[in-house]
Image (cartoon, helix red, strand yellow):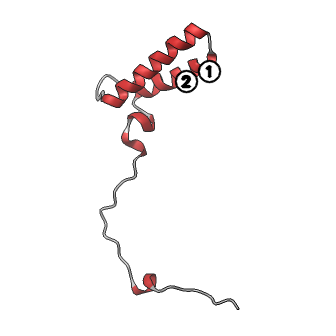
Amino acid sequence: MFSNWHTMRWVALSVGIFLAVMAVWYQDAVTGLFSGFFIFQAVTNTGCMVSQSCGVPQSNQPENRTDQDKEIKFTEVK
């Protein structure tokens, strides 16, 4: 929880704290929920914004194409 703090994690924490202050100031429950969401993501290092868990992994395997894949199959409609 206290390690691996990178820039986006600090940004998420800042946005969460800012929204929490605004939620208390304006007595708004929805903003309070959003602030809790951002603070939770920052503290636990989860979600697409703060971790790289949503990225698509790169494939290290070369593409194996056969002649069958290159052949175009179609049906002629008259």
Quarter of the figure that contains the N terminus: top left
**Picture quadrant of residue 31:** top right
| Residue sitting farthest toward the front | 78
> Residue flagged by tag 2: what amino acid is it?
Phe
Q: Residue at x 51, y 21 (%)?
A: 35
Q: Which residue is mark 2?
A: 34
Quarter of the figure that contains the C terminus: bottom right
Pinpoint residue 73: horizontal percent, then vertical percent: 54, 86
Pinpoint residue 25: horizontal percent, then vertical percent: 56, 8
The foreground one among 64 and 16 is 16
Pinpoint residue 69: horizontal percent, then vertical percent: 44, 81
Q: Residue at x 38, y 37 (%)?
A: 51
Q: Are marks 1 and 2 in contact (CB under 8 Å)?
A: yes
Residue 45, numbered circle = none
Q: Residue at x 40, y 86 (%)?
A: 67
Query: Above or below — where is 72 with respect to 47?
Result: below
Q: Which residue is mark 1?
A: 30
Q: Residue at x 45, y 16 (%)?
A: 17
SS category of the residue bearing label 2: helix
